[in-house]
Amino acid sequence: MLMNALLSVSDKTGLVEFARALHAIGFKLISTGGTAKLLEDNGLPVTEVAEVTHFPEMLDGRVKTLHPKVHGGLLARRELLAHMSALKEHGIDTIDLLVVNLYPFEATVAKAGCTLEDAIENIDIGGPAMVRSAAKNWKDVAVLTDPEQYGQILPELTAGKGKLSDKTRFGLAVAAFNRISNYDAAISDYLSAIDPGAGGEGGVPVRGLFPAQSNGRFVKIQDLRYGENSHQQAALYRDLYPAPGSLVTAKQLQGKELSYNNIADADAAWECVKSFDAPACVIVKHANPCGVAVGKDALQAYGKAFQTDPTSAFGGIIAFNRPVDLATAEAVNKQFVEVLMAPGYSPEALAVFQATKAKQNVRILQIALPKGGATDWDNGRNAMDVKRVGSGLLIQTADNHELAAADLKVVTKKQPTPQQIEDLLFAWKVAKYVKSNAIVFCAGGMTLGVGAGQMSRLDSARIASIKAEHAGLSLKGSAVASDAFFPFRDGLDVVIDHGASCVIQPGGSMRDQEVIDAADERGVAMVFSGVRHFRH
């Protein structure tokens, strides 16, 4: 029985080779426009769709496959006599294989200067219609929507002389419906973010940050053993197009399967450590940094970070922004660690964790650092943050603010020294990743005490000082970061009482002057950042 394959693609990667293989198997090739020309130019026999439908392409190619002789051939159920009789009556041949990828809408609207007209013209109509028809009739029709699928199915297609298993066809159908869903979501996101009355230059529309309808597009990576607690179920998903250098791009080199809490803590550690340019180490416990430090190398950074809070570091998540060498691995190996992350590992370092059965369970992740650049994507960061609330979502731009020394406003009579400025910026960077209310004592490129997640800023300050005392670290002359302003002078007095010599805070309180006067009275330097870093 003659087999028919309809090919109509925008992305022609690998198409000629695949079409040649189809022809060799015995498929009759049917195609449209530029796809047909490409096949003809490469010596393949091809029948134009217009010859099948007996109707010419029209409206600049907008109408070519929207025809009963196409959709009838795709939708007819072979096991139903009535369907097959209808095809015979109307002279319609079945289509057994459909190869379609869609107009590049996503790539078009991603280009700078894309006009609304360009966007609209790249909305595919006939392609999605054919894909839906073929995917609905998956028991009889195989549908391919991605060039990567060609090589995946070709061995089975060849061995089966044109036939594919139900499992393969169903998998292709699911992938096809997913592609259509993502395509439609991209169109919806784009169009519903446009304000047609906002003008725009040269036909380029003004796009809002928050579309009228938000369409999440995520792909499941894996099911997890359980969620935050053992009675909850969970799975890990990634963005459809994950940013290079983000956690979901990690490669697990060894260890047990990651848990829900492992992943949440690992994300906090990785986001924090990659924000430093110098060699850095971040140790996280229950989503809060309990030790952060920079050093001349990974080993020194780890030693300083671990010194902050050895108790909390037990069973923690450790992240480096430099490759882990033998000496660093041997130091880390002395403690119980759940997850270790770094851009790379020497063979000797990996051997350290594989030497004993207990350490073979350590989850070791390798993540390439983002290349860096002007966009959140370039820096491996989310552009948006999402929080689930009852039957809804809170969506906001991600807190990707970077503070520079030039941004600081000195508000006290006492001026901070260059070293204090360095310590204050370090403390501020750490505070950004600590749950509110956050108080962070730092000096010499390391955390000395971290107070996190308390209802009172005073309590966070006290807890930070207690942790420093337990670790045997002096807070004398330290720099302190507060993620939000001091509403009264009492919080400032507490950190000064414990040894702070300089403070960074956002400012913006009605009682700012009272706090500034207190700093002058106590003889400490204080700078305002002008921004806060609440992290709930």
Image: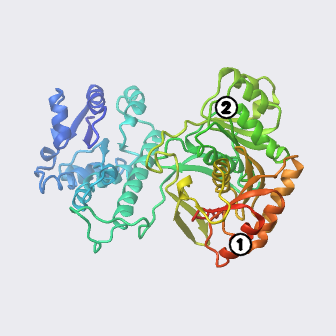
| Quadrant of the rendered image containing residue 211 | bottom left
Residue 428 as seen in the image, left or right of residue 440:
left
Q: Is residue 190 above or below residue 373?
A: below
Q: What amino acid is found at the position of numbered circle 2 in the picture? A: Asp
In the rendered image, which residue does mark 2 sit on? 297
Q: Residue visible at 27% across and 31% down?
A: 19
Res 368 visible: yes
| In this view, 250 is above or below 399 | above
Most distant residue in the top direction: 348
Measure the alpha-carbon separation of dots 2 and 1. Answer: 41 Å
Q: Position of residue 526 (x, y in %)?
A: 67, 62
Q: Which of marks 2 and 1 is in front?
A: 1
- Give whichever of discs 2 and 1 has the lower sequence position: 2
The answer to whether residue 527 is left or right of residue 107 is right
Given the image, on which type of amino acid does mark 1 rest? Asp
Disc 1 marks which residue?
Answer: 517
User: Is the C terminus in the top left, top right, bottom left or bottom right quadrant?
Assistant: bottom right
x then y, percent, for residue 205: 28, 64
